[in-house]
Amino acid sequence: MAFPLEIPHWFHAPALAAGGALATAAFASVAPAPWHAAGWAAAAVLAALGAAAGHHAWRSQRQVRAQLQHYLDSQRSFGAELSPVWSRQIEASRSQMEEAVANLALRFGGIVEQLEDTLRRSTGATGAGEGSAGTVHAESQQELGTVVESLREAMRSKAAMLGRVQELQTFVAELAEMAEAVSRIAHQTNLLAINATIEAAHAGERVRGFATVAQEVRTLSKVSGEAGAQITRKIEAISAAIAGTRDAAEDATREETQVLQASEHKIQTVLAGYRNFSDTLATSAETLRLGSQGIRDEVHEALVQLQFQDRVSQVMGHVRANIERLPQVLEDHCQACEREGALRPLNAAALLQELESTYAMAGEREVHRGAAAPAPAAHEEITFF
Amino acid sequence: MPKTILVVDDSASMRQAVGIALRGAGYDVIEGADGQQALARLTGQKVHLIISDVNMPHMDGITFVKQVKQLPLYRFTPVIMLTTENQEARKREGQAAGAKAWVVKPFQPAQLLAAVEKLVLP
């Protein structure tokens, strides 16, 4: 649409000059002779001036009209060229920020998951549950205690057996006494048989049979004495064997007792070492757990802080939408100027009102009204309906 | 069996932040980037609670809640609005649509979890 100009005041000069020329010419035609030529000359000069002024005015009008049209076109271009660039830059920044913050949040999420997994495992290993160091220690102590108790039981059985072996020695002593008694009886029987033989010799032929019997008794007592001596020798051998067995058993018991005590001591040492290790591990794990919990809480707080992105993104979105409206507002303004044939002032109120109507946050409204950037929003109470 | 919560927000970082807080508390989380996508996620899915933003493309949070309340399966599913908006008029819109609570961003995870535990379906 071309720009129609109102006729400015100075544009009336050629009309005035033409009017003047006509008036002068009329005056010249009716004036007395001395004024006649001068009148016509003046009218010609006025007409020439009028024509020149008219031409100048026409040229000026064209120039002004072209300049104003150029101005309005430049205003259109201003909006059409600048607004998309601003909009693209804002949108690109907003998108990059959103993407970066989302990735950051994703990584933070991964860190939190890893920390929680570590905490779970750590708690399982050092806590009181199945498979924990404390449980394994208690179970090991119980198992090894059972082994030691089995060894002690074996030692007690061996001691009881040794007691019985020592009892055998008592029986052997009794047997030795019995063998001694047999020897004594055989000796007495032999003396008795010798006396009987002597008495039989004094008695003569009448008791020859008795002498035979005495001889047989003597022979029998001799055999009995030899048997008693053999028994005594056997008992001595058995006694020696029992004593050897007892001594060997006592030696073995002493050694086994020492081994058992040494084993028990080693077991206690190993368990104490394991206990110390597991306690140290538990302390380290507790430190790790507390540290991990601290880091997790920090990450949670960081995630809360990352919510700024959502607010900033919204503000940028509102501003971008408003910037995108600028070309149309400028176009409407240009059309109004062209339609009305006059330059009209640009009014930001409508655009500002549109922008304000899109605000969702109190901080946006405060900034819009000229307040300084608001402090980070405090966490508000939840409203339950 | 963990309870399932639908988180609806056009900001991926917000979905992440909410998701981390909820998963840390033992909930299963499904996500939607706007009202339309969230409605699609609801199909045939048992959801114990919904957390929704208000200003979203394609379908805003208030419209989304109204549509959820039209679905027989989700009529009684509690909804928490999580938004930067704090105007009373908007809160009343949310309440009229069927929301049970209104949380203004930025949220504190503990605060949000307290609201979730209070409202989540058994």
Image (tube, rainbow, N blue to C red):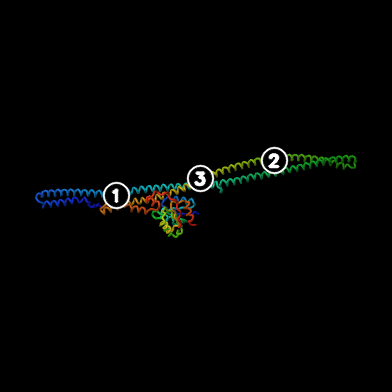
Image position, residue A118 (x, y; %):
51, 46
Q: Is residue B24 visible?
A: yes
Q: Which residue is mark 2?
A: A250
Mark sitting on residue A75: 1
Q: Is residue B93 left or right of residue A347?
A: right
Q: Is residue A17 left or right of residue B118?
A: left
Q: Amino acid at mark 1?
A: Gln
Image position, residue A348 (x, y; %):
32, 52
Mark sitting on residue A141: none
Q: Earlier in the sequence, mark 2 or mark 1?
A: 1
- Is A103 or A240 nearer to us in this picture? A103
Q: Is residue A35 left or right of residue A152?
A: left
> Could you tell me how far apart the alpha carbons at marks 3 and 1 are, in whole angstroms?
61 Å
Q: Secondary structure at mark 1?
A: helix
Q: Residues within 10 Å of mark 3 (few under 14, many from 20)?
A: some
- Is A220 or A381 nearer to us in this picture? A381
* Quadrant holding the C terminus of chain A: bottom left
- Is A186 or A325 nearer to us in this picture? A325
Find out whether the residues at labels 3 and 2 contact each other: C-beta distance under 8 Å.
no
> Could you tell me how far apart the alpha carbons at marks 2 and 1 are, in whole angstroms?
120 Å
Q: Secondary structure at mark 2?
A: helix
Instruction: Say yes or no: labels 3 and 2 on the same chain.
Output: yes
Query: In the displayed structure, would residue A233 be above or below residue A94?
Result: above
Q: Which residue is mark 3?
A: A291
Find out whether the residues at labels 2 and 1 contact each other: C-beta distance under 8 Å.
no
